[in-house]
Image: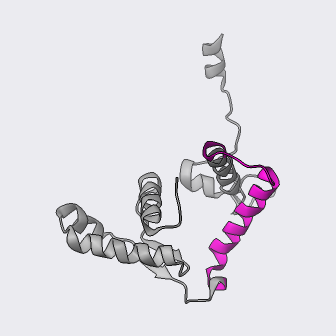
């Protein structure tokens, strides 16, 4: 189970990078686990200079911290955290969940947030499709219901 240690964050960052790719920039507040993880990653990279590490150093992640005591400067991601908390409170409320249940609900909230419209797909007012973060991840909103084509329908019969 995770905690708020630097080691736990490094594991989380590795899982994120394995799923989404290594980010070029990472923005965060000055939480002690983030600052500690930054120092530990720096020490680890200094100790284990191999071709693999040099590859990641060349394409490494630049970590940008907010100034201390200025969480308002993380406006975009703070708004995303607020949206995620809103959905979690509405769905979970006061219910105690086991880890797997919480992980499932969190994945569904993530899909909901990544399916919100960003802008119109075309200037045509009759076209109601919107660009969502899901389009950048899988090419469509994550909460869209799959369409069954006639070809798929014939195979089921």
Q: Residue at x 70, y 47 (%)?
A: 97
What's the magenta region?
Answer: 72-101
Q: Is residue 67 above or below residue 22?
A: below
125 or 156, nearer to the observer: 156
Query: Please, which residue is most extreme toward the left here?
Result: 50
- For image coordinates 78% across by 49% down, the residue present is 95
Q: Is residue 146 magenta?
A: no
In the rendered structure, the answer to whether residue 10 lies left or right of residue 74 reads left
Prevalent SS, magenta region = helix
Closer to the camera, 78 or 48? 48
Horizontal and vertical percent position of residue 110: 65, 54
Residue 46 position, x and y percent, is: 23, 74
Residue 108: x and y in percent read: 68, 47
Q: Is residue 92 magenta?
A: yes
The front one of 2 and 85 is 2
25 displayed left or right of 88:
left
Q: x, y percentage for residue 36?
A: 43, 76
* Residue 126 visible in the current orientation: no
Answer with the quarter of the image where residue 17 lies. bottom left
């Amino acid at each position: 189970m995770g905690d708020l240690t630097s080691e736990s964050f490094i594991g989380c960052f590795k899982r994120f990078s394995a799923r989404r790719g290594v980010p070029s920039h990472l923005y965060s507040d000055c939480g002690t686990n983030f600052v500690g993880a930054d120092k530990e990653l720096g020490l680890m990279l200094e100790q284990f200079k191999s071709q693999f590490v040099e590859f990641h150093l060349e394409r490494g992640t630049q970590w940008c911290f907010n100034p201390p005591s200025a969480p308002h400067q993380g406006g975009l991601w703070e708004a995303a955290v607020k949206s995620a908390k809103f959905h979690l409170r509405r769905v979970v409320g006061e219910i105690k969940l086991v880890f797997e249940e919480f992980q499932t609900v969190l994945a569904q909230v993530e899909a909901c947030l990544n399916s919100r419209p960003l802008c119109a797909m075309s200037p045509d007012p009759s076209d109601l499709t919107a660009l969502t973060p899901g389009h950048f991840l899988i090419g469509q909103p994550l909460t869209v219901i799959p369409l069954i084509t006639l070809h798929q329908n014939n195979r089921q019969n």
